[in-house]
Image (spheres, rainbow, N blue to C red):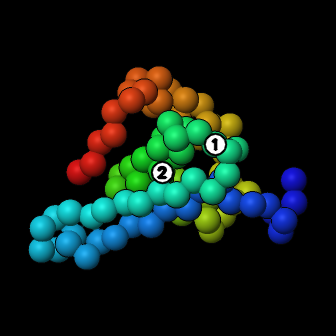
Amino acid sequence: MDPHSATPLLTFSVFNDYADSKDVALVRCDFLNKGIDNEEGRKVVQSLLDHYRDDTDFERIETFNHRPSEFDFDDHISKMNVRWKEDPGTVTMN
């Protein structure tokens, strides 16, 4: 309810030290409290990485970050639910 007193559920870091030389990046995710389970956290981080990798999705990220009043949250949630139902357990890294 109050973003100033909100506690993070998880943090993640992308280590891209080998991105240029080996075409590999490592992702570390730390769960900070019991408010999110491992599978849900994996889906959140995977979705975020997918959004940054896909040009169409990246436009939505820019809208969310720079023009939040134009961001359709309900549409986003419904698209994510469809995506997660289609591929509930696979982690794809390109």
Image mark for residue 36: 1
Residue at 21 percent across and 70 percent down: it is: 19
Q: Counting other residues with Cα less than 10 Å from the Cα at mark 1, is it few (<14), some (14-19), or many (20 or more)? A: few
Residue at the extreme top: 85
Identify the residue under disc 2: 45
Image coords of residue 75 (percent x, y): 62, 37
The amino acid marked with disc number 2 is Val
Asked whether the viewer can see residue 58, the reply is: no
85 relative to 55, above or below: above
Residue at 39 percent across and 67 percent down: it is: 14
Image coords of residue 78 (percent x, y): 59, 31
The amino acid marked with disc number 1 is Ile
Corner quadrant of residue 27: bottom left
Corner quadrant of residue 7: bottom right
The residue nearer to you, when weighing 47 against 14, is 14
Residue at 47 percent across and 44 percent down: it is: 42
Residue at the extreme left: 21
The residue nearer to you, when weighing 92 against 81, is 92
* Mark 2 vs mark 1, CA separation in Å: 12 Å
Asked whether the viewer can see residue 2, the reply is: yes
